[in-house]
Amino acid sequence: MAGMFNFEKLETWQKAIEFADLVYVSTRSFPADERFGLTTQMRRAAVSVSSNLAEGSSRSSRTDFARYVEISTGSLFEVVSQAHLSRRQGFMSEDQFQQLYNFSEILGKMLSRLRSSIAASA
């Protein structure tokens, strides 16, 4: 893509967008009465991962950026917790849960490495 914003070049941001896509697909079959409950909560938290990476990349200090990466990680963990509940309530199959969980592990490691890299260069 020509003229990309800096955050769009981050592999972690790209993976976070894929993660949000997966959460949207995974929650599509949730019951209608969860539309304003877990469905919305999970989707908002998933979108927050990439959004905080984008916002943090605009900060003037590396310390601020690292803080936004930390917030992104918190949002990721929020989705994992909500996925556990979704599985327990029968809204998500074991396969869907495992796919989301495995993706979360990969993204979590990427976020951790990014935060370490930012902190080391601060």
Image (cartoon, rainbow, N blue to C red):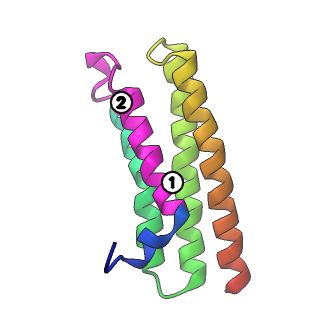
Q: Amino acid at mark 2?
A: Thr
**In front of the other: 30 or 12:** 12
- Residue range in magenta is 12-39
Q: Position of residue 3 (x, y in %)?
A: 31, 80
Residue at 52 percent across and 24 percent down: it is: 96
Which residue matches tag 1? 15
> Residue 39 — which label?
2
Q: Main secondary structure of the magenta part?
A: helix
Q: Quadrant of residue 20?
A: top left
- Callout 1 crowding tier (Cα within 10 Å): few <14, some 14–19, many ≥20: some
**In front of the other: 38 or 1:** 1
Give the alpha-carbon distance from disc 2 to disc 1, as whole Å: 21 Å
Q: Mark 2 or mark 1, which is nearer to you?
A: 1
Q: Quadrant of residue 30?
A: top left
- Which residue is outermost to the front? 1
Q: Earlier in the sequence, mark 2 or mark 1?
A: 1
Residue at 58 percent across and 83 percent down: it is: 62
Q: Amino acid at mark 1?
A: Lys
